[in-house]
Image (cartoon, rainbow, N blue to C red):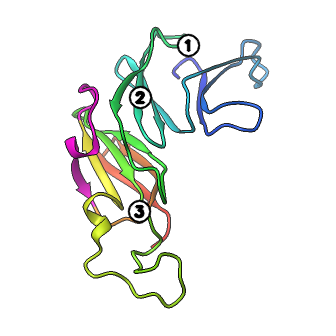
Amino acid sequence: APNGDVFVASRGTRDAPGGVVALRDTTGDGKADVRTHFGGGPGDEVAFHGEYLYYTTTSAIMRFPWRPKSLEPAGPADTVVKGLPTNGHRTKNIAFAPDGGLFVNFGSPSNSCQQTDRTANSPGQAPCDELATRAGIWRFDPTTLDQTQADGARFATPMRNTDGLAMRAPDRRLYGAVHGP
């Protein structure tokens, strides 16, 4: 956050559930001495956009209303996109376009669209049927609630699994780090 607070999406551990972990250093020693937790479900990413903190789980994209300089949301989460696929490469990374559009990664359910996934010498499928709904980046309206994947528009494909998305401000282009060929 602009004031130095750090927000982390957590998949959870044996001792703590997934969600958003917020950290604040009030003494200036470089160590967080205030820690809060909110949200739920195994998390992939957090991002501020407008007056909201967006949080992605493996199956949904949520947004919390946000107060500047706060470590906790101003109210309960809204669901922006729900019912997302969770099998295979399930990470949901996000980035925001300059015009406000929300980009979301949908990783492939397989490693290489084989007839028998992750099996040596299994031939690939041609055409690869998973490209219709997976292995790419979709664009959504972040102000519309309760969308499903069908409400989004495919922006880019084929990409096995994009582990990181970012909008580069100088050229206003979307960049991604793709995991695997």
Pointer 2 local density, CA inside 10 Å: few below 14, some 14–19, many at least 20: many
Magenta residues (range): 141-156
Q: Earlier in the sequence, mark 2 or mark 1?
A: 2
Alpha carbon separation for disc pair 2 and 1:
15 Å
93 relative position to 13: left or right? left
Q: Amino acid at mark 1?
A: Glu
The residue that label 1 is drawn on is 72
Between disc 2 and disc 1, the foreground one is 2
Pointer 1 local density, CA inside 10 Å: few below 14, some 14–19, many at least 20: some
> SS class of the residue under badge 1?
loop
Q: Earlier in the sequence, mark 1 or mark 3?
A: 1
Q: Earlier in the sequence, mark 3 or mark 2?
A: 2
Magenta run includes residue 146: yes
The residue sitting at the front extreme is 116
> SS class of the residue under badge 2?
strand
Residue 100: x and y in percent read: 25, 32
Alpha carbon separation for disc pair 3 and 2:
22 Å
* Identity of the residue drawn at 45% across and 68% down: 110
The residue that label 3 is drawn on is 108
> SS class of the residue under badge 3?
loop
Whether tag 1 and tag 3 are in contact, CB under 8 A, the answer is no
Quadrant containing the C terminus in the rendered view: bottom left
* Identity of the residue drawn at 42% across and 57% down: 107
Residue 12: x and y in percent read: 66, 37
Q: Amino acid at mark 2?
A: Met
Is residue 129 shown above or below 44? Answer: below
The residue that label 2 is drawn on is 62
